[in-house]
Image (cartoon, grey):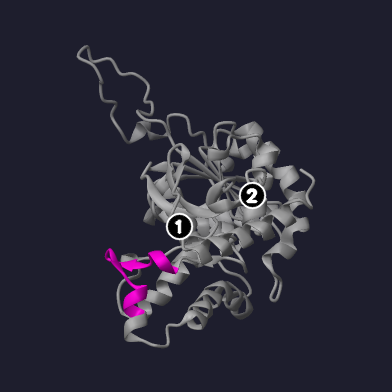
Amino acid sequence: MKKASSLMELGFDANGASSGFFRPVADDAAGVVTPTSHRRRLTKVSVIGAGNVGMAIAQTILTRDLADEIALVDALPDKLRGEMLDLQHAAAFLPRTRLVSDTDIAVTKGSDLAIVTAGARQIPGETRLNLLQRNVALFRKIVPALAEHSPDAILLIVSNPVDILTYVAWKLSGFPVNRVIGSGTNLDSSRFRFLLAEHLDVNAQDVQAHMVGEHGDSSVAIWSTVSVAGMPVLKSLQESHSSFDEEALEGIRRAVVNSAYEVISLKGYTSWAIGYSVANLVASILRDQRRIHPVSVLATGFHGIADDHEVFLSLPARLGRGGVLGVADMELTEEEAKRLRKSAKTLWENTQLLGL
């Protein structure tokens, strides 16, 4: 018998298949039955790249019931179909979500949100910026096609180096800047919050702490605004623990930056944390939650970044159904602002190599 993901593919006609089980219900006073139709607009999310990261994202979106339809795209047809079937077979345990997949990016048509994870995998010892040239060529194929099939979509870029590739996606898509977002330091900030929460013995959700700048080696820990339940933390830590000097703070920042490399060296890739991080962003966008996330946005003019430098890096941004609804002009110490400008300079120099 033919292998298939549905009874239709096995030769069974689906038209009116439910009529033998359910009696039609009249929907007006005259007893007239009209064809069923959706009472609300369905939400479609596409994930381009069905590797470890893409599938962790898709699985988390699915379990959190964030979309009515999820489209998966990958260049490897057998793996792609296998991943889709594996998720479809869990249908009895999950919210009802339509799953489709194809190697043709046309399957993403009509997406509300398109998440790009496709790209070369970061290997142990390789920096995110070393991935640049390998991934830009891929984006030249993916992004214009996404924009053509879903001209009103929001693009969420996860592929590394994410800040530069978000810039590439913005240029190649022709979309307004509010509809092109990079996952940025949303995950870095979670790692930062985790380390502080473990030390303070509190829930990480009660810790407010941001990493900004590049999602990479030059990211900046904003110690001046770290708080727990609204209470400033740094001064208290420094008064109670003399070990919290500048060197120690830099050591914590490096630990946050290197945590991804550690995971990669141990299991070969990162997946679960970025899956939860991106689903967190998806919820804020599609449910119009107006939450603040440190994500990669156009940072021109912020904190002394030159007005002629079109550079994307992470700043706290308010996200909603329209994408980026605003960027917080957060108060930084002079040292923090200096480090942020240095991070921007690193990204700008690499962006200039692209010739876009």
Please report the residue visible at 70 percent of the width from the left and 44 percent of the height from the top.
142
Residue type (three-letter) at the residue carrying disc 1: Thr
Horizontal side, residue 188 vs residue 146: left or right: left
Give the structural element (helix, strand or loop) at label 2. Answer: loop
Q: Quadrant of residue 125?
A: bottom right
Q: Position of residue 335 (x, y in %)?
A: 52, 66
Residue found at the very far front of the displayed protein? 334
Residue nearer the viewer, 196 or 46:
196
Quarter of the image containing the C terminus? top right
Q: Position of residue 20 (x, y in %)?
A: 35, 33
Q: Position of residue 32 (x, y in %)?
A: 28, 15
Q: Which residues are magenta?
A: 223-237
Residue nearer the viewer, 275 or 193:
193
Please report the residue visible at 54 percent of the width from the left and 49 percent of the height from the top.
302
Residue neighbourhood size for the residue with mark 2, other residues' Cα within 10 Å, grouped as few (<14), some (14–19), many (≥20): many
Give the structural element (helix, strand or loop) at label 1. Answer: helix
Residue nearer the viewer, 64 or 242:
242
| Residue of label 2 | 311
Tags 2 and 1 touching, CB below 8 Å: no
Horizontal side, residue 20 vs residue 11: left or right: left
Residue found at the very far left of the displayed protein? 29
| Residue of label 1 | 60
Q: Of the two numbered discs 2 and 1 on the same chain, state the one appearing first in sequence.
A: 1
Residue type (three-letter) at the residue carrying disc 2: Val
Q: Determine if the magenta segment contains residue 227.
A: yes
Q: Is residue 229 above or below residue 323?
A: below
Q: Quadrant of residue 180?
A: top right
Q: Position of residue 234 (x, y in %)?
A: 37, 74
Question: How many numbered badges does the structure rendering display?
Answer: 2
Residue neighbourhood size for the residue with mark 1, other residues' Cα within 10 Å, grouped as few (<14), some (14–19), many (≥20): many
Residue found at the very far top of the displayed protein? 30
Q: Determine if the magenta segment contains residue 58.
A: no
